[in-house]
Image (tube, grey):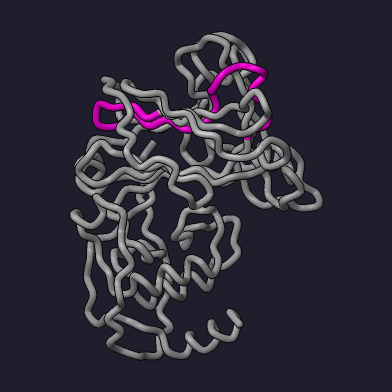
Amino acid sequence: MIRLQIRWVTLFVLLVGGASARASSTYIEYQAGPATASSTPGDVWSPDLWGWTTLDLSGATGSAGGVVNDANSGMNAWRVTDSVLALPNPAYVTEIFDRYMPDVRQYGWRYSATARLVSDYGGGPDMGLAAYLNSRVYHLMMDFSTSGALQATLSDDQTTRTYQLTAPGAAATAYHHFQLQNAPASSVVSFTFDGQVIDNTWDGMPFTHANTVQWGADNQGGGLARGEMNFRNVLFDIGPFTPGDFNGDGVADGRDLLYWQRTLGSQLDNSADANGDGVVDAADLALWRQNFGRTFSVAEAARVPEPTAAALAILVLFAAPVFRRTLSPVF
């Protein structure tokens, strides 16, 4: 049924005439790449090829390397191992340059990864994502509960925020999509797990630090925290974020429908993953329909968006190129 609808809609792509809006952009990303029959760990795309800088991966406190066809997914992964009770922690980091920070503050940011926790070595929360932005720090750290369930801990200076994400067993070590999204012009960040909002009131902790984001070992407190995590992809975007705007041009329109079609089922390009569950599928098309014609608004983006009726004004035949806007910082 979905295939028939797609073919019909491609003949009549819905556009908002003359739409012009501010666009989102990808600042930096990482993709481990697809696996082939002849792939070796040395063939896996390394983070440094994408502009990431290594943070103590010499083997003194940790290591990293490629994993071919991880979990029989057809995709490779990059494994980061924090095996020693010492600092600094092994991770990958990049600086957000000053010239981009005004947009980060005004329009918000989004930081996501598709990854799986392999081991926590029986310690506490460690592996995950960290963002040091606007004089605050956000640590998203994973470990297993005593029963073997996957759980996440969010750093906070006021309350303990630990959430059980899966049941014990295979789901705990499977691939999942983790996403942090900052509300524009605020310090509030929402944590989404496989498309489900887990916490939307988190504001991290005050911390003076260069503006950077990192992934890998994350617990700077040391202690017993260690871990091993496989990362399939990592993405840091700068807003504004418009629901249904898959190609990042600032408006949800017919171009985004074409982008959704071209990336449907893709494990390399999740730009059309509107609900943040790590998969481009029919659920994302439904969100595009709900938000057709919408452009970015700071007031709307600062709260959980409500579905709106699209003002479908024009039916036209459309065959323009589809692309996503990507920044090119010099490293």
Q: Residue furthest right?
A: 37
* Residue at (23% x, 75% y) in the render: 19
On whether residue 132 falls in the magenta region, the answer is yes
Q: Nearer the viewer, residue 89 or 100?
A: 89
93 relative position to 150: left or right = left
The answer to whether 275 appears left or right of 186 in the picture is right
Q: Position of residue 22 (x, y in %)?
A: 23, 61
Percent across and percent down for residue 267 are 60, 56
Q: Which residue is depicted at the point 62% across and 38% down?
A: 116
- Of 251 and 144, which appears nearest the observer? 144
State left or right for residue 179 relative to residue 182: right
Q: Quadrant of the C terminus?
A: top left
Task: Please tell me whether residue 259 is drawn above or below residue 141 in the rendered image.
Answer: below
Kindly tell me whether residue 68 is visible in this rendering: yes
Magenta stretch bounds:
117-138
Q: Please, is residue 292 above or below residue 158 in the view?
A: below
Percent of width and height locating residue 314? 30, 89
Residue under the image location 51 percent in, 66 percent down: 283
Residue 277 lies left or right of residue 76; in this view the side is left
- When asked about the image quadrant of residue 240, the answer is bottom left
Q: In the rendered view of the protein, which quadrant contains the N terminus?
A: bottom right
